[in-house]
Image (cartoon, rainbow, N blue to C red):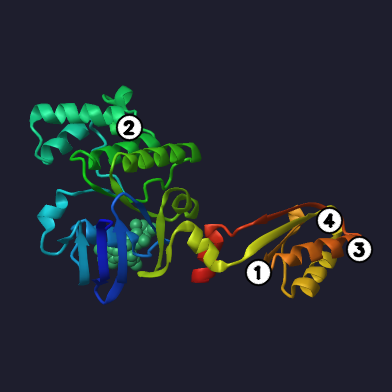
Amino acid sequence: MENIAVHTKDIVKNFSGKHAVDGVTLSVKEGEIFGILGPNGAGKTTLLRMLATLTSISSGEAQIFGKNVATEASKIRNLIGLTGQYATVDEELTAMENLIIFSRLNGLTSSASKSRSLELLKQFSLLDAKDKAIKNFSGGMRRRLDLAVSLITKPALIFLDEPTTGLDPRTRGEMWDVIRQLVKDGSTILLTTQYLDEADQLADRIAIIDQGKIVSQGTPDELKAHLGETYFEITLGQSNQADKACAIVQKIAKKPATILPEQNKLTVKLQDTKIMTQLLVEFDHQDIPVQEFSVRKPTLDEVFLEITGK
Ligand SMILES: Nc1ncnc2c1ncn2[C@@H]1O[C@H](COP(=O)(O)OP(=O)(O)OP(=O)(O)O)[C@@H](O)[C@H]1O
Ligand SMILES: [Mg+2]
């Protein structure tokens, strides 16, 4: 049987009458990356804070590696690491000093703190910057240090709250590699993100959360297949024929096309892909030159829009 790292049943967080998390049920398997995807205020941080024993659970149940989050908090703290959405490191201190302080707070001896800190600095390519104050770090270096701090005790389960928000694309990619490596080394990861491509790239399974509730759950492919539609994109060869082309789409596909006028591009969502050929043939008959066409599955962005309607 597969081991379950996190299991929640109907967990709720109530802030003075408002449910920030409103009955979330999910299971995270050992060794997977599970993504919680949702917009600002969806309840992502609150959910992680409950699981990390930083705030109480108002109702419902949660277990981590079979231990009850509400009643076995100290055991759970030995099993988890949390990289918060906002950094907890001290700006004035160096990377090495921060790591040593957090190592000592985690109960490591002075010499163990030093060797673990050096090990982590090496793992996160921060060895050259070990004596630099954090205030002089770039966003990406800072995020890597945040992550390093939460890994001091080599936790089996790692919570990452928006690990790449605010990072440039290259640095995000590096962070993704770091996260994938953690899983290869045997960790389980529960991460939150507002980025659909991040969930798509990283997560084995995703729960989409909106206003405290899970609105959809599955693998990235399942979520996309859920829509069952294929996107057919046609770029016209001439800019003045968009209206005529749209009328043809309406007639043949029986649904409107979305137009990007500045790119001369029409997009049609189709259930039945045979319609694509019919469209191309009709364009040809009507002397509408097609410069380019492509077929693709919806992006997670489009899935999200479809599910939440915003
Ligand atoms: N300590 C608190 N007291 C009262 N309300 C809170 C508290 N913390 C969060 N909330 C509210 O709970 C809701 C969910 O907040 P949360 O921070 O969990 O969202 P989030 O999904 O992490 O958003 P973001 O993407 O902006 O980080 C919000 O409406 C927020 O205002
Ligand atoms: Mg948050």
The earlier-in-sequence mark between 2 and 3 is: 2
Determine which of the numbered discs, if any, sits on residue 271 in the image: 1
Under mark 1, the amino acid is Gln
Labels 1 and 3 touching (C-beta < 8 A): no
Quarter of the rendering containing residue 124: top left
Q: Is mark 3 within 8 Å of ligand 1?
A: no
The earlier-in-sequence mark between 1 and 4 is: 4
Quarter of the rendering containing residue 205: bottom left
Return the residue at label 4.
239
Return the residue at label 3.
285
Q: Nearer the viewer, mark 1 or mark 4?
A: 1
Could you tell me residue 306's position as x and y percent? 54, 69
The earlier-in-sequence mark between 3 and 4 is: 4
Distance from the alpha carbon under mark 2 to that under mark 3: 60 Å
Neighbour tally class for label 2: few under 14, some 14-19, many 20 plus, Cα within 10 Å: some
Disc 4 is placed on an element classified as: helix
Determine which of the numbered discs, if any, sits on residue 250 in the image: none
Return the residue at label 2.
124
